[in-house]
Image (cartoon, rainbow, N blue to C red):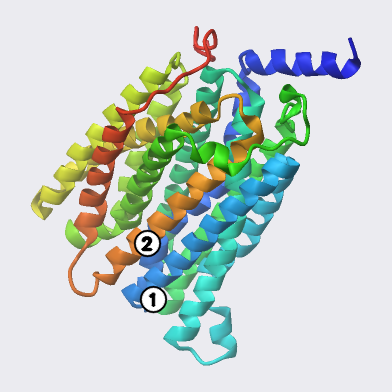
Amino acid sequence: MGDNEIGDEEDLSRVKSDVGRWPVFYYGVGHMLNDITSSCWFTYLLLFLADIGLSPRDAAIVMLSGQIADGFATVFTGELIDRFGHFKVWHGAGSVLVAVSFSSVFGGCLPCRIFSTSSVVETTSYSVAAAIFNMGWAAAQVSHMAMVNCISLNSTSRVVLTSCRNAFTMVANLSLYAIALVVFSVITGKSHADIQNQYRWIAYSSIFIGCCFVGIFHFGTKEPRLKMSIHGNDHMRISWAYWFKKALYYQVGIVYVLTRLVQNVSQAYLAFYVIQDLHMAQSAKALVPAIIYISSFVVSIMMQEVSWTGQRLKAYFSIGGILWVFCGASIILLPSNMKVYMYVISAFIGVANALMMVTAVSMQSVLVGLDLNGCAFVYGSLSFLDKISCGIALYVLQSFQSYVSVTRYGLGLVPAVSSLVGVGVTLTMKLHTHSGSLTKPLLE
């Protein structure tokens, strides 16, 4: 038996076994920079642009430009990763681009200092910065998500890696809101310059924290060796048509897109809702989201102890979707004189978010299975649909903002309807996980 065959057998045996605690931790922190900047993006971008004077439609254009650039970059990155591999190279390059460009989004309009200040110049400047930021974000996201399938073939281990990643997403979000709470308390936003200074400090602090965790990820995580060696051909790439012929690809795609729509749209309008509709204190812009992410973090940690099957993925997603339907209805009907109940609703939203996101991403791993040579395309193409649909949804909602308040519908109705449809699609799925790999939890 040749050395290559022995190496392939060792790789195959390694990735079918459970992944240890430290590899799970090192992998889980790898998306922190993306997560903390994304949280700032969806929570505060529209609020920031409104505070500095952009119209709702111009703010929507900035958001949409970023989402479109992100969407196309995910497909492009996924295709290149499937062809050439090197997950960590793509992740590192994307992280550098995120760190450099994100400060430009909240750092003020640089062209406005050179040319005359106008809505066209401002909108164009912020749109370009948003597009560059999202291209880097896409490269880091797709490489990190696709890496799961090449770290382990064990279905439970894949869910645990995803669950740990989601747990640190919650840590990233909580870090952002802790920073925001301090900044909003220390720096008063009385003038245009003060408002820009607030968000500039939030952005710089977020980048610093995220980059620290990116360093930990690259230090502790090894480049997966089995990318294509299991199939015995280092150059054989699965064509796109292979996935387009699978009914499960479309089902998982719909569920994932709807799940991301639930989280992104609700996050974008949460700050507006608590301030404008419920008339809560300014600190609620940080406190209410913090409650959501604390409960989501706890649930994500608990989900690491579950032994996973396809039926359990469907069941847990359905529970989360139904919870969001009730939360959405409560948000729509909640009067301002009962605003204290928003803290209770927030806790249930966090539980629902964790249940839906961990299982929706894990369904992608089930879809990929052993077809590792096309895994990056799956994550890239589904992320493309996610970005475009979210961008269009926010643009449509913002376009009506000048005529009627859409915050209740953006936070309540859209996520509730999306969750309900997602549950319906989930019930039609046939998720087949590999036998023998789901006998016990990973973290015992």
- Which sits in the foreground, 224 or 268? 224
Circle 1 crowding by C-alpha within 10 Å: few under 14, some 14–19, many from 20: many
131 lies left or right of 193: right
Q: How many marks?
A: 2
Percent position of residue 92, x then y = 70, 48
Image point 68% across, 55% down: which residue? 96
Q: Is 311 rendered above or below residue 138?
A: above
Among numbered discs 2 and 1, the one appearing first in the sequence: 1
In which quadrant of the rendered image does the N terminus lie? top right
Q: At numbered mark 1, what does the secondary structure look like: helix, strand or loop? A: helix
The reply to whether residue 268 is in sight is yes
Question: What percent of the width, then of the height, locates residue 320?
Answer: 29, 31
Q: Is residue 164 above or below residue 311?
A: below
In the rendered structure, which amino acid carries the disc numbered 2?
Answer: Ile
- Give the residue at mark 1: 58
Any mark on residue 392, and which?
2
Q: Residue at x 37, y 79 (%)?
A: 53
**Looking at the image, which is closer to me, 303 or 208?**
303
